[in-house]
Structure formats: C-alpha cells, structure tokens
Image (spheres, rainbow, N blue to C red):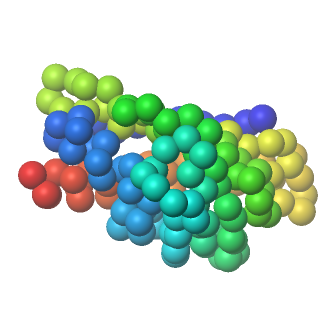
Amino acid sequence: MAGFQVSTEIEAPIETVREFVDKPENELLWQSNAIERQVLTEGPIDKGTRIRLVDRFLGVHMESEWEIVEHHPYYRADRTVSGPIHLEASWRLEPVENGTLFAMGMEAPEGAGGFFGKLTDPVVLRIARRDFEANLAKLKDLIEAEI
C-alpha cells in the first residue's frame, strides 16, 4: 500500500472542528472533488455507518460506498466497501496552542493509479496529496470564518 498524510492547524476549538468534519454533507463544502454524499444507515455517525460518495478525480466520475471502521471523538477511519478503487482514509484531531491540528491520511493499494498500474501510482498519489492540501486550506478558511 502507498499513501500520504497531510495536516493543518485550525484556529478553532477542537469540538467545533470535530462537529464540522464529522458530518459527511459538509465534505461538499471543502472537498473539491466531492459531488454527492448520502448516509445510507440509520442513526448517528459512528462505527458501521455507511456512506455513498460520488466524486470526480482526474476527470473521472467515481461512485463508491464507504464504511466507518473506527470512530472516536477525535479520530475516524473509513474504508471503501464498493467502488472502482479500494481505499482507506482517516482523520484525527489534536488540541494545539492556538486551536486544533487536523490531520488526514489516505492509503491505496498498489496499482490504484489506473490502467498502467504501479507505474502511475506516484503521479496519482502526488495529485491526490496536492488536492488534499488544497482541501485542508479551504477547510481551515471555512471553520475560521465561522468563529
């Protein structure tokens, strides 16, 4: 598996950040590739919750279903259960002097880069990492503007 992790410090209380990032529908506000989010299970967001995602990445429309496999107040891990690429993603929150550190990571199996398999993985991961960094900057701006 190959992957990456990115982080940013948000000048907001940890609870404010947690409440915002733990709502799948808010991903439409800060994730540039997000087109649609639909929670498929009943009840609050927690371990076992399934979410339908529609995204566009590198010009390709992708639909997938994700399941939350671990959920704590300041940590969440998800994995795809169906879709074109099987990924694992997580985020965590930590209090810091001026607010909250928000870190998120992505893991993908070898060959997730597409038709050319392992050869394109480094390029695809680099593009995904750049997108994640831009998304975190947008997330930071959105939350800090609300305070």
Question: Residue shown at 52%/75% (left/top)?
Answer: 35
Please say whether residue 6 is visible from this viewpoint. no
Q: Residue 106 at x, y = what percent?
A: 61, 42
As drawn, which residue projects farthest toward the left? 147
Using the image, determine if residue 9 lies above or below residue 63.
above
Question: Residue shown at 49%/36% (left/top)?
Answer: 71
Question: Residue shown at 14%/29% (left/top)?
Answer: 98
Q: Quadrant of residue 23?
A: bottom left
Please say whether residue 42 is visible from this viewpoint. yes
Q: Residue 105 at x, y = what percent?
A: 55, 38
Viewport quadrant of the N terminus: top right
As drawn, which residue projects farthest toward the right? 116
**Frontmost residue, 122 versus 28:** 28
Total numbered labels placed on residues in the image: 0
**Frontmost residue, 45 versus 146:** 45
Q: Is residue 40 left or right of residue 9?
A: right
Question: Residue shown at 76%/63% (left/top)?
Answer: 83
Q: Residue 115 at x, y = what percent?
A: 89, 62
**Frontmost residue, 106 versus 72:** 72
As drawn, which residue projects farthest toward the front? 42
Q: Residue 84 at x, y = what percent?
A: 79, 63
Q: Is residue 16 left or right of residue 4?
A: left
